[in-house]
């Protein structure tokens, strides 16, 4: 079994290449993200970013609005107030770093890309802001679209599927077609583990991940320290590193291209070990 090929993407006026298997480090400029250790202010963001880049992160994902289950919506102004100083500081300190903005708002995406980000990571797949797809097209950056049933405020109240893998794959396929119709050149899909899904749904989706990989675009997975680990093991998020590594490894073996994680070093080690086994990994 060979790993994914390197991923060429267009970023503004440059052609850049992501490793065939990349690790995305999470930087939360929020006071209420579910994993407290990922919350950063500007100074802490610089320290954490330096560590993550040294550990092998290919991308740093900056978010200013928590999307944890039950999270309340923050205003556009507050989101910008949180993320822009972090992005600007990171861009100054690490000008070659690949930065991503985690937002469902087109206005925030536009401001973040102007400040230095090179990717838009949208939990709403363009459905929470009617201007998102058109905006990303004009920004000329890669776009991550994610499946979510409901919204963060209500998504875990009563998620229901007849066939979760089939329904998520169909949704991602439809949104991928919408992105192509809008003129977005480079699209990455995310099945949205934990977003409007029970633990049973999440494991079914992980088992059937090759169905999503078959869409023919890179697949990003965010399994890091999530409830699907904690419910099974009877632990809390701050105890879930080992479980995260196990599930990340399963995702890589099922074809995932990008791991979105709180703990970069351990994810990079998982990639390296699978590469040595002859499985997933960068060339």
Image (tube, rainbow, N blue to C red):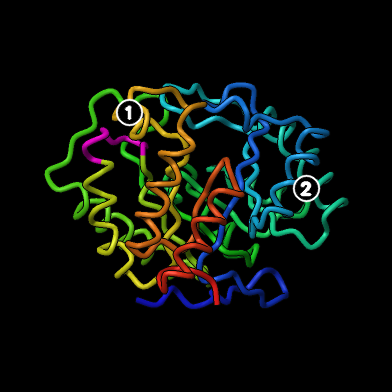
Residues packed near mark 1 inside 10 Å, few (<14), some (14 to 19) or many (20 plus): few
Residue furthest toward the left? 162
Judged by its main secondary structure, the magenta piece is loop
How many badges with numbers are in the image? 2
Q: Is residue 282 above or below residue 144?
A: below
Which numbered tag is attached to residue 50?
2
Q: Is residue 234 above or below residue 202?
A: above
Left of 195 or right of it: where is 263? right
Which numbered tag is attached to residue 42?
none
Left of 20 or right of it: where is 97? right
Closer-to-camera residue (96/66): 96
- Tell me residue 21's x, y (percent): 51, 65
Residues packed near mark 2 inside 10 Å, few (<14), some (14 to 19) or many (20 plus): some
- Tell me residue 200's x, y (percent): 21, 37
Q: Split into 4 quadrants, where in the image is the C terminus?
A: bottom right
What kind of element bears circle 1?
helix
> Nearer the N terminus, badge 2 or badge 1?
2
- Determine if the magenta segment contains residue 70: no
Q: Give the image quarter of residue 216.
A: bottom left
Q: Give the image quarter of residue 149.
A: top left
Q: Is residue 39 above or below residue 252?
A: above
What kind of element bears circle 2?
helix
Q: Please name the residue shown 79% across and 63% down the image.
A: 96
Residue 181 visible here? no
Q: Nearer the viewer, mark 2 or mark 1?
A: 1
Q: Please name the residue shown 71% across and 48% down the image.
A: 112
Magenta residues, start to end: 194-201
Residue furthest toward the right? 92
Contact (Cβ within 8 Å) of mark 2 with mark 1: no
For disc 1, the marked residue is 233
- Determine if the magenta segment contains residue 199: yes
């Amino acid at each position: 079994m060979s790993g994914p090929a390197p991923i060429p993407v267009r970023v503004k006026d440059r052609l850049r290449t992501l490793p065939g298997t990349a690790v995305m480090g999470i930087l939360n400029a929020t006071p209420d993200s579910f994993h407290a250790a990922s919350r950063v202010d500007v100074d802490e963001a610089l320290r954490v970013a330096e560590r993550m880049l040294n550990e092998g992160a290919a991308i740093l994902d900056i978010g200013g609005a928590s999307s944890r289950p039950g999270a309340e919506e923050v205003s556009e102004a507050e989101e910008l107030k949180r993320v822009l100083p972090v992005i600007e500081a990171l861009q100054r300190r690490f000008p070659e770093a690949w930065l991503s903005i985690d937002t469902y708002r087109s206005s925030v995406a536009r401001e973040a890309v102007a400040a230095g980000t090179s990717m838009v990571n949208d939990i709403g797949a363009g459905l929470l802001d009617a201007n998102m797809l058109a905006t990303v097209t004009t920004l000329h950056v890669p776009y991550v679209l994610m499946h979510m049933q409901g919204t963060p405020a209500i998504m875990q109240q009563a998620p229901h599927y007849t066939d979760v893998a089939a329904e998520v794959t169909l949704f991602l396929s439809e949104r991928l077609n919408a992105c192509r119709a809008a003129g977005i050149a480079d699209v990455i899909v995310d099945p949205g583990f934990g977003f409007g899904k029970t633990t049973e749904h999440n494991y079914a989706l992980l088992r059937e991940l090759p169905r999503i990989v078959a869409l023919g675009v890179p697949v990003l997975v965010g399994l890091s320290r999530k409830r699907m680990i904690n419910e099974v093991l009877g632990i809390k998020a701050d105890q879930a590193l080992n479980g995260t590594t196990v599930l990340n490894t399963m995702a890589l073996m099922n074809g995932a291209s990008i791991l979105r994680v709180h703990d970069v070093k351990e994810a990079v080690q998982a990639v390296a070990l699978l590469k040595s086994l002859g499985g997933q990994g960068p060339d």
